[in-house]
């Protein structure tokens, strides 16, 4: 029987009603894995939209296999930036009007104090994705994006930390580099690919520093995707032999085939495996 996926609605995230017989106190054994973030957390697929194929779903399947009382609460929002995660406005169909993913997550964590055993987060890529376009990278856009991420991610993590209390396992994710696909477009594209790795490194170091300061472990997705390995090579059909980092982007995302940054099903599993290595 496949692992039971419990995709709780925002209403459940805001309040859980437990009926008890009069005079009988019963401990609720249910506990939760709360997945927060952007489209990678949701499981977005080009041409389909949000699915149950994100890394959170894959990680949950592994965790649930050894812990049947664990339930998955997916609160991520496709297209979410650090700003919209705080202030709302992106996924108005998922969260009550006037609230946000962060507010809903904080409320759920407070309402289920002591029951949330796993918390994962990826956020920030959408703050800088538009900085690479037209065969070049805009340094002013990058700088502003990184400053925004640093300020907003600190707000997000501070809020989660205050609401969550002693969650046994909190894991933040660094990112792979979809712009390595520019390598396929010629000399200028190779220059963009090389420059994008430097951008990725600054983004990931910025986020990792904040995650660690707030008690999060790091799922090293950049390493899983070999994101800075131009020295070794790997063959991927139909693109031929490529630097390993470029090959991983072509094999595990839709960037080379559809110019879409999202992971394939195998790519989401690769991300989930990076999270699983931090589960202890």
Image: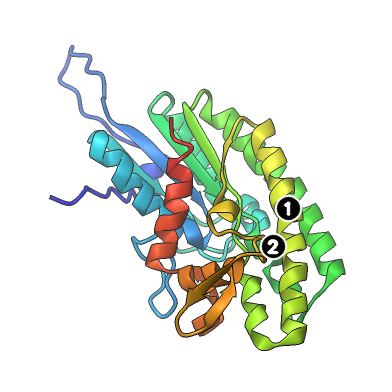
Q: Residues within 10 Å of mark 2 (few under 14, many from 20)?
A: many
- Secondary structure at badge 1 equals helix
Tell me the residue at 39%/39% (across/down).
33
Q: Position of residue 183 (x, y in %)?
A: 66, 79
> Residue farthest to the front?
232
- Residue extending furthest toward the right: 140
Q: Which residue is mark 1?
A: 149
Q: Position of residue 259 (x, y in %)?
A: 56, 81
For residue 178, say whether it is visible: yes
The single residue placed furthest to the bottom in the displayed view is 186
Q: Is residue 45 left or right of residue 206?
A: left
In contact (CB < 8 Å): disc 1 and disc 2: yes
Dot 1 crowding, Cα within 10 Å, few <14, some 14–19, many 20+:
many
Coloring applied to the structure: rainbow
Question: Relative to residue 146, is residue 24 drawn left or right?
Answer: left
Does the image show residue 108? no
Q: Nearer the viewer, residue 229 or 163?
A: 229
Residue at the extreme top of the image, as rendered: 23
- C-alpha span from label 1 to label 2: 7 Å
* Apparent side of residue 222 relative to residue 4 in the rendered image (left or right): right
> Residue 127: which disc?
2
Quadrant into which the C terminus falls:
top left
């Amino acid at each position: 029987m496949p692992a039971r996926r419990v995709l709780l609605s925002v209403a459940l995230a805001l309040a859980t009603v437990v009926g008890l017989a009069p005079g009988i106190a019963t401990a609720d054994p249910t506990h939760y894995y709360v997945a927060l973030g952007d489209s990678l957390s949701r499981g977005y697929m080009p041409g389909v939209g949000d699915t149950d194929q994100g890394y959170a779903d894959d990680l949950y399947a592994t965790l649930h296999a050894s812990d049947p009382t664990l339930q998955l609460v997916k609160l991520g929002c496709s297209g979410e930036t650090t700003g919209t995660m705080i202030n709302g406005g992106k996924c108005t169909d998922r969260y009550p009007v006037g609230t946000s993913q962060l507010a809903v997550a904080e409320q759920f964590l407070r309402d289920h104090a002591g029951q949330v055993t796993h918390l994962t987060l990826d956020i920030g890529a959408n703050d800088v994705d538009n900085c690479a376009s037209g065969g070049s990278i805009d340094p002013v856009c990058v700088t502003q994006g990184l400053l925004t991420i640093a300020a907003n991610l600190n707000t997000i993590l501070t809020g989660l930390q205050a609401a969550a209390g002693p969650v046994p396992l909190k894991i933040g994710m660094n990112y792979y580099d979809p712009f390595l696909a520019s390598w396929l477009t010629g000399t200028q594209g190779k220059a963009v690919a090389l420059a994008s790795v430097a951008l990725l490194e600054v983004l990931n170091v910025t986020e990792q520093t904040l995650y660690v300061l707030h008690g999060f472990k790091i799922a090293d997705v950049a390493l899983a995707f070999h994101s800075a390995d131009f020295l070794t090579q790997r063959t991927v059909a139909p693109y031929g032999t490529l630097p390993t980092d470029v090959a991983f982007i072509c094999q595990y995302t839709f960037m080379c085939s559809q110019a879409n940054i999202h992971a394939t099903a195998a790519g989401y599993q690769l991300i989930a495996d990076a999270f699983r290595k931090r589960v202890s």
